[in-house]
Image (spheres, helix red, strand yellow):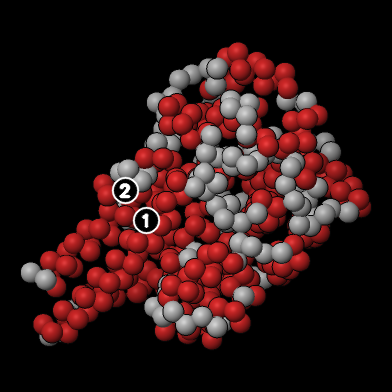
Amino acid sequence: MERENQKLQASENDLQNKRLKLDYEEITPCLKEVTLVWEKMLGTPGRAKVKFDAETIHTAVAQGVPRQHRGEIWKFLAEQYRLTQTVPSRPPSNHTPYKELLKQLTSQQHAILIDLGRTFPTHPYFQAQLGAGQLSLYNILKAYSLLDPEVSLNSVFALFLLWLSFLPDMIILQIQMYQLSRLLHDYHRDLYSHLEQQEIGPSLYATPWFLTVFASHFPLGFVARVFDMVFLQGSEVIFKVALSLLGSHKPLILQHDSLESIVDFIKTMLPNLGLVQMEKTINQVCEMDVSKQLQAYEVEYHVLQDELLDTPPTLNQHQRAAQLERTNQSLRQQNLDLLEELQFISHPVVSPLNTCQFICIDGKNLKSTHLLRSYSKLRQKTLTLKRKTSAVETICHP
C-alpha cells in the first residue's frame, strides 16, 4: 500500500479528484454572500480557540454550506461544539499521528479491503479499484481500527454470516425508538394512532435512519445537509428529520391500512424525495427544538423499565400464555426486520462504510465514531431477540 499511498498523496490536489468528490446533487445551493460568511469564519486566525456567535453559525448553516468547503466547515463546527462544552472531553488514549498509523498493520485489514468495492459503487470517486477514493477510505478505516480496536470492522460483512451468534441488545437504539414514538405522539397524534393500530413501532422503519444518519437510503445531497445539521446540533437532528419526513407524508401514509404496505411505503417512498421537499425538511429541522422532550422521554423510558421489573405477575396461566404469544409475534417481526436491514450486504449501496466514507468525500478524513460503534452494536440486538423468541416459544408451546 505504500506505493499506492504515495500516488494518492501526489494526487490529493488534483482538480479531477476534487470534482469527483463533489459529484452529488446539492439541495440547498449556497449563495455567494453566504459563502463569503463561511470563508471569513474559516479564515479567522487561531479559529480553533475562537468562540463565534452561535446565532451567526446557525443562520449560516440554515442558509447553506458551500460544497467545496464542506469538509473544513464540519471541522469548524466540531471545534465550536467543543468550545461550548463545560465538561472537558476525554483525551485520546492513542496520540499516534495519522501518517504513522498508516504504516502499521491492523487485524481488520482483510475485512476493510473486501468491503471497499461495495461502498457507494456508483459514485465516481469510489469506482476505481484502489483508486484515490477507495484508498482514502481504506486509510481512514485502517487508522480508526488501530485507534479503537474494540470496534470490529469485520461486522461490516460478517454481520449476516454470524448474526445468530451476537450478544447483548442495543439499549441506546431502544431508547431512541421509544423517544421517536413519544415525539410522534406529540406532533402527529393521528399518524401515531394509525401506526399503533397496525402494531407498527419505529423499529420497523426507523432503525437504519438512526444507525446510518439516513445515508443508507437517502440521496447524498440530502444526507450532506443532514450531516451539516448534526455537526451543528447533535444527534437530536435525526429525530427532527424523522418527524419532518413522517409528518410531510402523513396523508399518504394514512391511506395505507396494512402493516406491510405502510412499512413498504415509508422505506421506499420517503427516500425518493424531490429537491423542494428535501429543502423543506431541512428548513423545518432548523426551526424545531425537541431537546427537552428527548431528555424527559429518556428518563421516562428508564422509569418504565424499572416498573416492569418491579411489577409482580398478576395474570393467570391463560392470560400469561396469550401475552407471551403476542410478545413472541412481536419478537419474530423484529427479527425479520433486523434481518431485512442486515440484507444491505447484498445491496452494495447500503453499507456502514457508506456513511464513514461519505464523511470523507470532502477530503478531510473526518470520522464518525458514533456510527461505527452503532454498527458494531447492531450485531448484538439479534441474538437477544433470538433468545427471547426461543424462550417465549418454549413457554407458549412446551
Q: Regarding mark 1 in the picture, which secondary structure is present there?
A: helix
Question: Against 297, is 194 above or below?
Answer: below
Left or right position of 276 against 89 = right
**Is residue 288 left or right of 371 when viewed as pictured?**
right
Tell me: residue 300, above or below residue 14.
below
Q: Quadrant of the C terminus?
A: bottom left
Q: Residue at x 53, y 75 (%)?
A: 183
Q: 230 or 220, which is in the foreground?
A: 220
Going by the numbered disc 2, the residue's amino acid type is Trp
Residue type for callout 1: Leu
Name the residue carrying label 1. 339
In x, y percent, where is residue 162?
A: 30, 44
Numbered disc total: 2
Q: Position of residue 391 (x, y in %)?
A: 17, 64
> Is 340 in front, or is 371?
340
Quarter of the picture containing the N terminus is top right
Question: Residue 374: where, in percent of width, then height?
Answer: 45, 49
Measured Cα–Cα span from mark 1 to mark 2: 8 Å
Mark carried by residue 219? none
Element carrying mark 2:
helix
The residue most toward the right is 33
Residue in the picture at 43% in, 41% down: 156
The residue identified by callout 2 is 163
Assess whether mark 2 and mark 1 are in contact (beta carbons under 8 angstroms).
yes
User: Dot 2 surroundings within 10 Å: few (below 14), some, or many (20 or more)?
Assistant: many
- Please tell me in which quadrant of the rendered image residue 60 appears: bottom right
Q: Residues within 10 Å of mark 1 (few under 14, many from 20)?
A: some
Question: Quick check: 378 above or below 44?
Answer: below
Q: At 81% across and 29% down in the image, what residue appears?
A: 15
